[in-house]
Image (tube, rainbow, N blue to C red):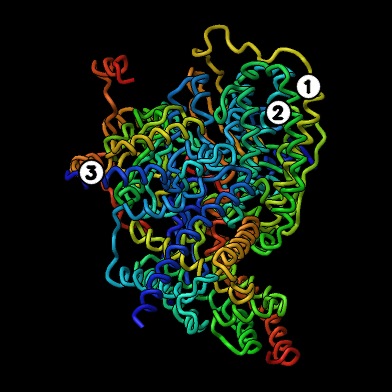
Amino acid sequence: MSKEVKLFLGPNHPGMHGNSSVHLYVEGDTVVRARLVPGFLHRGFEKLMERRGWMQNLALIPRICVPEPDINEAVYAMAVEVLSGTEVPERAQWIRMIILELARIASHLMALGGVGGSTGLYTISHWTLADRDRILDIFEKITGARIYHMYIVPGGVRKDLPEGIESEIVEFLDYIESRSDEFENLLLKNRIIRTRTEGLALLTREEALEIGVTGVGLRATGLPYDIRKSDPYAKYDSVVFDVPTATEGDAFARFTLKYYEMKQSIRILRQVIEKMPEGPVNAKISSGSALRWRVPEGTVYTHIESSRGEYGYFVVSDGGEKPYRINVRGASFPQGLYGVEKLLAGTRIEDVALWLTTMDFCPPEIDR
Amino acid sequence: MSNEHKAWERVANMLRSRSLWMLYYCTGCGAIELPPTMTSRFDMERLGIGPMATPRQADILLITGYLSTKTLRRVIYSYEQMQSPKYIVGFGSCTLNGGIYYDSYATINKLDLYVPVDLYLAGCMPRPEAIVSGFTALMSKIDKGEANGWKEYQEKNDWFKRNQIEALGEVYVHDEFHE
Amino acid sequence: MFMNIVITILSGIALLVVAFIFTVTLEGIARKIEARIQRRYGPPFWQNFIDIFKSLTKYSISHGFIFDFGILMALGGTIATVFFIPAGSLAVFPGIDNVFVVIYLLAIGLLGMAMSAVGSGNPNASIGIGRALAQMLGYELPFMIVILGVFFHHGTSSLSDLVSIQIAQGAYNVWLMPIGGVVAFVSLIGMLGKKPFDTFIAPAEIASGPLVEYSGKYLGMLMIQHAFATFIEIGLFVNLFLGGGRTLWEFLLKFLIVYFSIVIISATIPRFRVEQAIKFYWKWPLILSFVQVIIVVFVMGRR
Amino acid sequence: MNSMNEILKEVMAISGEFSVKEVTARESIIFVETSRLNAILEILKRKGFSHLSLITGVDRIEDGVFEVFYTLFRWETGEALLVKSSVSRDAPVITTVMHLWPTARFYERDVHEFFGIVFDGNPDLKPLILENWKEIPPMRKDFDPQKYSNEHFPDRHYGSEFLVEGGGENE
């Protein structure tokens, strides 16, 4: 038997994003077999959600997925609105799109910084995270908190946008666009990054469909599948934007797509700010106090396009004050568990951390 | 203690407080506020605090938020591997009393029972400013020589060990690779 | 006779102190420069001193005799090499500080660290050491060829003589052999383990490679060894190609310029994989070094 | 690109009647017995519902039944279909769909760990997320997390001295 070493890319590893462990069987420098062991961030979310009222869950929900908490609130709000049949006012839908697109830009900036972190190019991490902080300031002005906003509630949005926030968002968008050529020179045109990531984590179209990869991983293989286009929610059907795709399907294609998607989000935000009508911001959901609110009986699955792929909530209600069952479909569940087992064999040890970064791997979505 | 040992301790504490190395291990949801604290905007490095890859080289172990039982085992491994003037900083209310996950079957409620905690930071995910001010408080605490969590862990070791076994069943999982 | 022994000892100690203090402050300033590139302030420039002395105050854990002995061998080998680097007017062994002695003693230092890292039993450390030695093959080859060209041209391999020749001639070796200078500079980046070639201390992949199991005092000693190793490698390059320096301050100024240019280059470049690093060295730098040697031997001839 | 209703009619033509419940314009639920489940899922996959989003277990404790939902999604038209089948609570065995969607292996492993539903044909139903878990599968309705948390993880008791500490001089 050749000398096969067992290695932990364990929970306590600088290359690991978040907190889960990849068990590697290594021969020399290449990985022979790999297996993901999740569960380090498991808090039994779905069980806790069954013990809290519909509106009490709002405090719990954004805490599932840390890099991008707003998608949870949006999906939960949409699911409850479908079940209870409440009509969301026009302006609230536009505001939701602002929050979701800003969260997408922030998450993409963090992902690009992550690429720098695993290849040693710390300068790009510092730049992207500094710019992401400006988005968090805008969030702080809109919702009062940096990360967990609890801003999108069933029936619309908690309160209207503060005065003059639109001009600040536009100023931020101009700032990001002015920085884009520096990002491109440092990251996309960097020859060593190109040689390090070309051919890494190659994903053919059949493999992507078989694994159930969604989001940038799927679009990197050429399929223009984006939930904002195929199953539009909020006001995405009345906004013009296109879905960038690539054909190589490797790590380099994926994070360049993330970069171009960020540009598309900027384009969406500009249109949203022009087209946003005036009007009420949230609909009256229940006669009595919101804590005693009873959602009519029913089952629904709603999903949106998060920065990592399809993110969905499966909500079952039995007409009571508390949800009967909520199941969270994280975008990195299939590509994290099955993707690691199927595709990580054959890569070198140096590239495992880079593989996980570009494969959009977010452990809390697996453990919930 | 003889007074030259005390003088040496004072110098050592002054050095230890100026250069703290943080273990690069995000155990909970608060870890998302560490990148902004380490990078350009809040820049923890100007205080001499920087991330270190291995427990051997680290001084601080951050428990950022809730702690599931599986992570508690790895936290105990890492804490025991760290070299001894070591400090633990607990983020948010989840380390004090279970926080928002008080009724969860997978997360512990009171961190103090399992590992000695030197500093708690307020905030359900403390903001970067809170983290930086917390670290400066920790630095002054170390400077005054009061941050002796690691001595407490050595003296009351069996008490900590009993709590750990009680909560986790067994701390050292045998077939980590579940062959 | 007794007097020059005392002078040698005193100048040796002075060189050690200068090397340590100068290199560690330089590393602190380099951290500040890299921070400025990353749009932040960065630590005070004496932060590296505090880091070293803080690690020396911590408790540490040993992994057996090989682990301890390797560290002492590394530190001793590197300190012994520092004596053979003339720093401007401060040359400890003026006549006999030969480049081959420096190369040999440097190898002792690196092998000592390799031995102790593998002795620590951590798989990350052995992978890191494997990469370090493989990369050493990469940058050692073109560097050696170019140096042999310099010796052939000047007829001597003693550092202080080379320095005095260049000063007397007024023309540094960099102007005489520009290609050789470039190749030596590139392999210097590899020798220092700066960014494009720091695969063996890569934190994101193998958790800071060989330094995985070092804690407390061992880590302090290794940081001191790293400071001296930086002084040796850059001092070698400055003496061979930039003509050492009449006074100590001129040498330190050149040292500073070379070091900061490496830091700025390495701040905006990611890391190579190991086989890419070796392929890189054995492609262009090797070809250029052959071209340089051919020019020196056939065109320039002996001086 | 025929819409969802035509597809469902074709499937009904092939494998017999099943009831359909409309949720939204692009989403509906169909109720299928476990015996016909695999056949129908295979037809649906061929007809375009190629993406298996999720396998969810719901514990209907009052009527003693586990419901298993297969959420399928069709990229071209953006339609989602929830295929529901139920299994008795005391002998929860259902056939696996790994041959249709290999990634289902991990969804089934997750549902098995949290509900105890056995997917026969799925080779590795090992524990995925919980470690050394000796209780009943935690997502069942008869498992009370609060009781488990109070037994295993004692928490801080704020006695009267806490008031002194709060209002006291050492802030």
Q: Is residue A18 left or right of residue C177?
A: left
With B88 as the anchor, is C129 left or right in this view?
right
Q: Secondary structure at mark 2?
A: helix
Q: Residue furthest top?
A: A287
Give how far across and how far down residue C268 sits, in percent: 65, 56
Residue D41 visible here: no
Query: Nearer the viewer's eye, disc 3 or disc 2?
Result: 3
Q: Quadrant of the N terminus of chain D?
A: top right
Q: Which mark is residue A98?
A: 2
- Between the C-alphas of marks 2 and 1, the distance is 10 Å
Q: Is residue D159 left or right of residue C240?
A: left
Task: Indicate the chain on which mark 1 is placed.
Answer: A
Q: Nearer the viewer, residue D34 or B56?
A: B56
Quadrant of image for the C terminus of chain D: top left
Compute the Cα span from label 1 to label 3: 68 Å
> Which is more toward the observer, A268 or D48?
A268
